[in-house]
Image (cartoon, coloured by chain):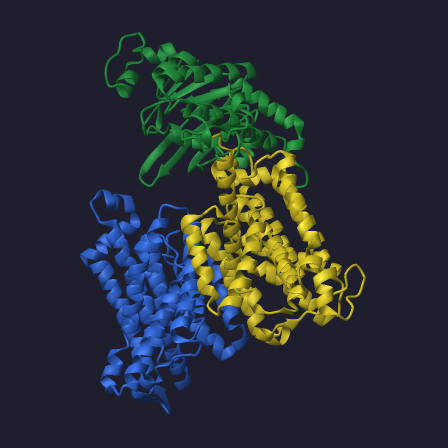
Chain colours: A green, B yellow, C blue
Amino acid sequence: MSLLSTQALVKSFGDNRAVNNVDFVVRQGEVLALIGSNGAGKTTLVNLVSGLYRADSGRIVFEEKDVTSASSYGRIQAGIARSFQLVNLFDQLTCADNVALSIFAREGKTLKLAALASRDRAVWEEAQGVLRQFGLDSKASILAGAISHGERKLLDVAVAYALKPKLLFLDEPTSGVSTREKAPIMDIVSAIVRAGGITVVIIEHDMDIVFRYSERIVVMHQGSILADGSPDDIRRNDEVTTTLIGTHVTGESAY
Amino acid sequence: MPKNRPLLMVLAWLIPVAIALLAAPYVVGPFHTLTLMYGLVFGIGVLGFNLLLGYTGLLSFGHSAYFGAGAYTVAFMVKYFKIASMELFLAGSVLVSVVISLVFGIVCVRYTRIFFGILTLALSQVLWSLAFKFFWVTGGTDGLRVPTPSLLGMSPGTDKMEFLAFQYYYYVLAVFAVCVAVMWVIVHSPFGKALQAIRDNETRAEFIGIRIRRFRLIAFVVSGAFAGLAGALWAPLNGLATPDILVWTFSGEIVFMAVLGGFHNFIGPIVGAMAFTYLKTYAVGLTVYWQLALGTVLVVLVLALPKGIMGLVELIVARLRRPR
Amino acid sequence: MESLVIHGLNALLYSSVLFLIAGGLSLIYGVMRILNLAHGSLYAIGAYVTAWSIGAASAAGAPNALLFLLLPAGAVAAAAVGAALEPTLLRPFYRRPEEYQLLVTFGLLMIIEDCLHLIWGPNPLSAGKVYQLAGSVTIGTSRYPAYNLAVIAIGILSALALWAFIYRTRFGVVLRATSQNMRMALALGVNVNRIYIQAFTIGCLMAGLGGAIVVPGQSAVLGMGVEALVLAFVVVVIGGLGSLEGAFAGALIVGFLRETGIALFPEVELAVLYLIAAVVLLVRPAGLFGRA
């Protein structure tokens, strides 16, 4: 059952066709990796679906409803959420605040002027719970700007996760993190989304992460989808390995 | 940013300050009480202003428009409707400044940073030029007289100085306390948190489902309402409403007050308004070149102490807390 | 017909001065992204220095020709002040949020206003002698001050000179490159600090020249800087912040609108200008020629 599908999606920046007639499908409940070299159009595609950019032409259908002309607000209400490649957090607010804000927003409570935020116990307990799931509960009252980079990457995902979305886009959740820290981060993220039954699309460059954590891989190249299949299919796909890595690789993971 | 200090620490300075404010008219002469009152009134205005700057990240260079609108509303109510009730003045001023800030705000919140600043400045100048040019309505540069109002139905009596320094002072102090409490709740509400989120990261705020423009507009209007209320309190104190209260350099003074006190802090704006009022009063009394003095203070402040007085206080407190 | 010509000339006169002030403001913003709230004060410095030097020379019995030669004195003074200010008071703020620039230049405005007061006192200073010496020309049945025509000429010449400077010289190329991409210019070996101080000085020179040429026709008074700044704002808002063509077009529009306003509805003249600025900001925030 397709949760999300795009039809003939096009986005150009000047002469550059960043997304070139893409038919992208995401099925309910899967963990999908979106890979490709720099400039392949992965982030642009995610930006189009999440509502940061408007498509030049084409359709985006989510849960069988056309959301092509919906605002980013509309898409979030529909159940699409995203994290960011370059960490986007509320640096002068605490980690708990950051997560709580998603919860307040989700519950439509952000317009409340006349009540103290601290009084809403349910929100703060849920926020604490989310932080605990991500291993950040000790940092609850620390400012988001003051924690380590790896912790910030986790918090970035947590903020999107707290929206309880149906479809979650993670844009390079381990970028900038040391190799040693990558797997632990992905373990946490992976466990949480599987437990929650959230459909996830991960943009990643690290092939080890890609092959270990995803069920399906979509490869993009120069604005189009080059290949689409299980990790094994992709590994055996010569065109993919030549385009991405530049050499002919044997059946085993290079890592 | 707002810190959660134990209640005891807050009371440690809040109680002496409250006592000092309550006792002031009996301890210091009328001149100082009046100066204090100006400080309190500007304090309300700058507190409102800082909702936009400190909490939403928008620097308005046109807040004189709402303050002045409040003041002129009082003057018009006196001149054209023969009203003398302070409560009606407050209600009228808030209403007018809400309408004006709503209209101006709808235009301004589509932009940020420099364009936002320029737009707020240009719009406030529209009001100033109207007050200046339509002198048969507004009194032009001569201004409009604002006599002492009745407070809670009680007429002011004949001794103006006595009225201002006592009855009016306590009235202003009470309104001030209410305004501070209201702003404190707003800033600590989910709405207040959302504003800070918009300030810290507009993109992320949008992507957790906060409608940026709507929130900015609400903050703008609340901010304008506080400024209008302050203007209404100011008018009887000053006795006169003139275009000077609408000109853009007064908007600059409002910004100055916030920066002086420290706009990263809840009480910073109040401290700044008080400090600026005293500084200006002192400077004006000392030399005709008070602008030079204050201008220098501002430049030094921005160069050396961008977090203002409260920033300095926080630095000192942190240093005292450090284990030796 | 004749009164139309005279109104037209008056409009051009106002536009010339406006162009100089607004052009300087726009140039500085275009190159350095600094919105100088004290820009009007540099205009005032130009006015005061020129008025004072012409007054002093005239009192000392200098020949009339010298008086005319002293006109640019204010422009030079303003440029000198600008050259001194940029490295000391503005450079520390380039890396800081824009809001701090507005604050420091606002403080500067207050300082300069009072310095003018301190140096030259509260009374207006005039260089009316030059105005009278220039005589008048006949237009139809009226006589029109020749000095005004000179101002218009200076305005047009400045616009041309500036255009040539920016678009036809090597320095202009470097200037434009730096304004479009400072980091790239830096990486290519451009001495950005030097470009900035030069751009700022030119901007201040223009403002000072505006003040200098205005002062024979109207006196230098306290507060003229504050007033001029907001008008310059209106011009750059209409024309586009950072664009010289915009400053030129905006100055013409404001000059003619103001003249029409004065002739037809004197009361609303000022308000209309600010309203137009607000409408332009609403409809086309980048202005006619600007890039947002």
Q: Is residue B274 left or right of residue C183?
A: right
Please state the horizontal and vertical placement of residue B74, each as a whole percent of the image: 68, 65
Q: Residue furthest left?
A: C170
Residue B99 at least partly seen: no
Residue A217 occupies quadrant: top left
Q: Is A76 in front, or is B92?
A: B92
Q: Is residue A212 left or right of residue C282?
A: left
Relative height, residue B214 to residue A245 (above, below): below
Please state the horizontal and vertical placement of residue C243, each as a whole percent of the image: 34, 58
Q: Is B169 in front, or is B127?
A: B169
Please state the horizontal and vertical placement of residue B86, each as a whole percent of the image: 74, 61
Q: Is residue A159 left or right of residue C291?
A: right
**Number of marks:** 0
Q: Is residue A194 left or right of residue B114?
A: right
Q: Is A39 in front, or is C131?
A: C131
Please state the horizontal and vertical placement of residue B166, each as a whole percent of the image: 73, 61
Residue C66 occupies quadrant: bottom left
Q: Residue furthest bottom?
A: C141
Relative height, residue B51 to residue C136 (above, below): above
Q: Is B46 in front, or is A187?
A: B46
Relative height, residue A194 to residue C139 (above, below): above
Residue C187 at least partly seen: yes
Which residue appears at 42% of the width and 67% of the height? C113
Which residue appears at 33% of the width and 71% of the height? C46
Which residue appears at 60% of the width and 58% of the height? B66
Relative height, residue A51 to residue B270 (above, below): above
Q: Residue furthest front?
A: B324
Which residue appears at 27% of the width and 69% of the height? C76
**Quadrant position of the N terminus of chain C in the picture:** bottom left
